[in-house]
Image (cartoon, helix red, strand yellow):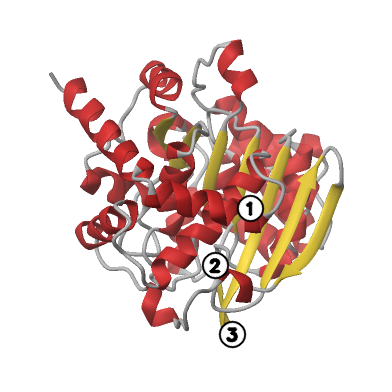
Amino acid sequence: MLKTLTDRLREGLELAAPQAQAALQHLTAEQEPAEAKADFLAALAQKGETVAEIAAFARGLRELSTPVPLEAEMRARGILDVVGTGGDRLQTFNISTAAALVASAAGLTVAKHGNRAVTSKSGSADVLEALGIPIDLSPDEAAVWLREHRFAFLFAPRYHPAFKHIAPARKLCAARGQRTIFNLLGPLLNPARPDSILLGTPRPELCEPMAGVLRELGVRRGLVVCGQAGPEAWLDELSILGSNRVSECSPEEGLVSYLLDPEPFRTQPATLADLQGADAAANAEMARRLLRGEDRTPRRDMVLLNTAGAFLAAGRVGSLAEGRELAAATLDEGKAFDKLQELVEAGGRRGK
């Protein structure tokens, strides 16, 4: 069956929803050879994944994931994720993680879904662990943290057991230099089912399709962004270095795409070198300085802009300019560092 679907893709034909569902059953089956799975994933990527295909795979994998048991009151409050697909390979510091912490400090409930580093030296799990924030919360613990602290990290391998049967095929594709649909799916599989999301992608042409996928999945409001970092370089973040492609989806406006000029959000000249990160320990110290309000370098401008995007996605503000002001106040009034200390102390009590 998987070979038949692979041949279909090689002919340039799209998968209907039932075919995507059948393919996913084979991809997550232990007995299916990794080589056959890798051939399918390569053929799908080479054809080019459609909005319908990405949405179908996301729905299927969500059904296989371990959910976070959130009460109706928590759902009504609203859940936000600030996440990137990764893959820009530009080795920046952990921008979306810092922005997620600032957003939580400002009163939003943030379920940060992520993993350890794959294409960088420090993933969201790595830097949060270095900060002293637990990354191994169970579903029940995550629900408590979201209710009591307005922040929880959901470590992807703990919530997606089916992925262990896909990992060998992904490794084969990576060894061949072939990206797969799973490079796009990660941010769509948050087990807390956030109703708002700031999602970064490393290729500007993906913004509008990924926003379409968010609509298909029932996300109330989403911003999909890609920021220029150089003539041929793009970040899976909003960027102060160059023009930004933004695609918004919302019930009021449907799907709207536009370019965002970084100039109003940049307080000083900046280059990509100013945004470089290092290992988890170094990135954690950068985050502490940012959250304490001590870092006034371009890193602060990046975090303020991306936090503004998170506020806009969550409906907390009406514009990015308003969101940047709120983010700056959250840092300058000490609320962001207070939030960090709260989470670290809660993590310490958890181990006793």
User: Label 1 neighbourhood size at 10 Å, few (<14), some (14-19), many (20+)?
Assistant: some
In terms of sequence position, does the residue under pointer 1 or pointer 2 come before the other? 2
Q: What's the residue at 59%, 13% (across, down)?
A: 73
Residue 345 drawn at (x, y percent): 21, 30
Residue 65 drawn at (x, y percent): 52, 27
Mark 2 is on which residue type? Gln
Q: Marks 1 and 2, Cα distance to the nearest angstrom?
A: 41 Å
| In-image side of 210 versus 287 (left or right) | right
Q: Which residue is mark 1?
A: 322
Mark 3 is on which residue type? Glu
Q: From what the image shows, is residue 218 above or below residue 118?
A: above
Nearer the observer, disc 1 or disc 2? 1
Say which mark, if any, is on residue 232.
Answer: 3
Q: What's the residue at 49%, 21% (across, down)?
A: 68
Mark 1 is on which residue type? Glu
259 or 30, which is in the foreground? 259
Q: Which residue is mark 2?
A: 178
User: Label 3 neighbourhood size at 10 Å, few (<14), some (14-19), many (20+)?
Assistant: few
